[in-house]
Amino acid sequence: MLSTHAQNCFIKMTIKRIFLTLCILTIASVLKSQVTISGVVKNYNDTVFYIGETGGFHNFTRVWRDNRVKVTIDKNQHFKTTIPEETIGDWYIKTEKGNQFFRFIKGQYLELIADFSQQEPLYAIGKNADDFNYSVYEKEGIDNYHLNEKFLEKIRNNNIDSVLLYRKALAGFKKAHLDKYRNSHKLSDMYYNWLHSQYAYEPFERTLVENIKKKDSIDDVTVSKIMEKGIKDEYAALNTPEYNDLIDFYVLTRINSQGNRDFTLNDRFNFVADNDIIAGNTKDVYLSRFMAWLFKTPDSIYTPLFKKYDGIVHNKEMKQYVINRRKDYTSPLVSSTVDNSSTSSINEIFKKYNGKIIYVDFWASWCVPCRNEMPNAAILKDKLKGKGIVFLYFGYNDKETAWIKARNQLGIEGEHYLLNDKMIKAVDALFGINSIPHYAIVDKEGKIVSKRADRPSDVYQQLVNLVEK
């Protein structure tokens, strides 16, 4: 029998081994969620380029996806970086000739050639290349289909039967196009199945979004047409946002059919949690989306609902997204950029930058168009580096935690101020703001040159002209 000291040593060693194993598993999980890319750049004069998410909602939480990654090019025109991708997601690169859209698949390694003389500059070679290169093949096929079939003209009417017919025909073409590619290329099963599921549900989700105006008062016949594919697809629940958006709609129609317009948040949650209107992964994802949507609610509402949710949903990965969503809101984040929000007045802010041209960006974490312009703002800053221009960001009608998180997430470099109510009234009067995003330009003498300036993607020449005055 081991002595007490030996037992204690054995226990400590066992705990260390367990802890080490957990660390390794955690690291492996994190790395698996990333995509490693490397390659060589051709016909490009800058030292950086940016890869950004095209948007779209996270499948389990319906949180907007808008990561942006800065890729640095070394003196030998090579680059290497990691992309944060937890599943399969749509990304893009902006060039002088337009945007190239493509997909990254979690855990993959890609070797890319970035030839910026081409309309589609990124092309993969080697392992996983066929997965990456499918996006260009897919786009070319769909563009030709749209042109030959006059597809966009056909789906502009509100006749649901006709629109669904045209959209399902397009989905059939996409599936055949995908199969044709797969017959001659090494397309991964993961990517193939993901695309196949997306194509299946797109016609119904797109019709719901684009062709049905009053979603709260749809008749049962129309609901049955939109929900033609059913509500029991276990694979689609875990992998296909279009399917889960349709489920959200379906549950809403069931709630509305109860004739009780006074349903509280608790009532809505319990209506799904306590009944069998949906089941399995479909139910788990719906409840996870619901809890993620409640991330700003008081503890008195959130805590009992989460306790019930915790007892129903057993998918740990799914549940962790919900926990992180709430934690990000309730736990203050440390800012990674200069924070001057304690300044007491608008005049004091502008006085700090006398002698410099100021490009002002009024934005908020909740404003999708504001966030979509941030990659263009980063490119603009790089072009104007060393020109004596200050990029001034005013957080407008925003909450501090969400504002700081968005700044860190989007990597917004510049001078930041979170406006209080008094300051908002002042800038509204000064710049005539009635919506955001809103941009303005102030010259070196502190005079307003433009109360309504162009967006970052279009303002370059105007700023250059001011610099050269």
Image: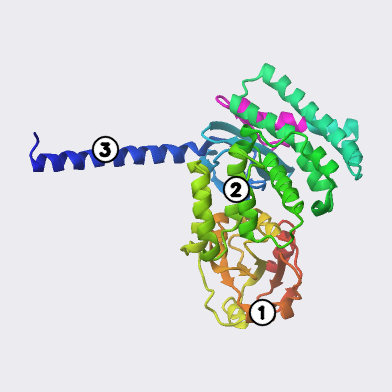
Query: Quadrant of the image for the C terminus?
Result: bottom right
Residue 436: x and y in percent read 72, 66
The residue labelled by disc 1 is: 446
Q: Can residue 469 be seen in this view?
A: no
Query: Residue 274 shows which numbered tag?
Result: 2
> Residue sitting at 82 percent across and 47 percent down?
210
Q: Residues within 10 Å of mark 3 (few under 14, many from 20)?
A: few
Query: Quadrant of the image for the N terminus?
Result: top left
Residue 421: x and y in percent read 63, 79
Residue 419: x and y in percent read 61, 75
**Amino acid on which the number 1 mark rests in the picture:** Gly
Alpha carbon of mark 2 to alpha carbon of mark 3: how far? 42 Å
**Amino acid on which the number 2 mark rests in the picture:** Asp
Which segment is the magenta one?
A: 115-140
**Amino acid on which the number 3 mark rests in the picture:** Arg
> Residue sitting at 68 percent across and 17 percent down?
184
Q: Is mark 1 on a helix, strand or loop?
A: loop
Q: Is residue 284 above or below residue 446?
A: above
